[in-house]
Amino acid sequence: MIMATNRPDVLDPALLRPGRLDRKIEIPLPNEQSRMEILKIHAAGIAKHGEIDYEAAIKLAEVC
């Protein structure tokens, strides 16, 4: 079984008792460069009008 969550604070403590899971792998949030690469990958297949300022979009994402 593979479990994933972005809200570990709401997990039932019974799920995290010893012997329930073999491993706990934490993946940190992507840095600015990684976020830009992710955005470019997902925006590649979308019709766009004009140029997109990816850096400005990344800066906006930091504020949210």
Image (tube, rainbow, N blue to C red):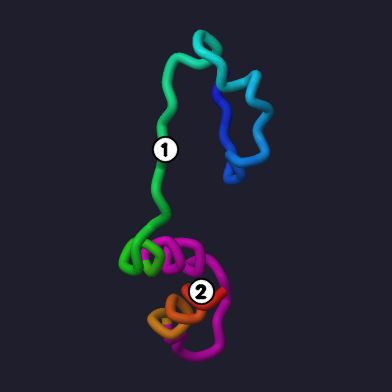
- Region in magenta: 37-53
Badge 1 marks a residue whose secondary structure is: loop
Badge 2 marks a residue whose secondary structure is: helix
- Classify 12 as above or below 20: below
Label 1, residues with CA under 10 Å away: few <14, some 14-19, many ≥20? few
Q: Residue 8 shows which numbered tag?
A: none
Which residue type carries mark 1? Glu
Mark 1 vs mark 2: which is more N-terminal?
1
- Classify 23 as above or below 57: above
Please say if the residues under marks 1 and 2 sit with CB atoms less than 8 Å apart: no
Residue 64, quarter of the rendered image: bottom right
Instruction: Give me the residue at 42% from left, 80% from top.
Output: 54
Which mark's residue is nearer the viewer, 1 or 2? 1
Q: Position of residue 9 (x, y in %)?
A: 61, 41
Q: Position of residue 51 (x, y in %)?
A: 45, 88
Q: Give the residue number, with chain letter if any, for mark 2.
A: 61
Q: Is residue 47 magenta?
A: yes
Left/right placement of residue 44 relative to residue 15 reads left
Instruction: Give me the residue at 47% from left, 74% from top.
Output: 62
Instruction: Give me the residue at 36% from left, 64% from top.
Output: 37
Instruction: Give me the residue at 35% from left, 68% from top.
Output: 32
Spatial separation of the CA atoms under disc 1 and disc 2: 22 Å
- Classify 39 as above or below 56: above
Label 2, residues with CA under 10 Å away: few <14, some 14-19, many ≥20? few
Residue 8, quarter of the rendered image: top right
Q: Position of residue 60 (x, y in %)?
A: 50, 80
Q: Give the residue number, with chain letter if any, for mark 1.
A: 26
Q: Position of residue 10 (x, y in %)?
A: 67, 39
Residue 31, quarter of the rendered image: bottom left
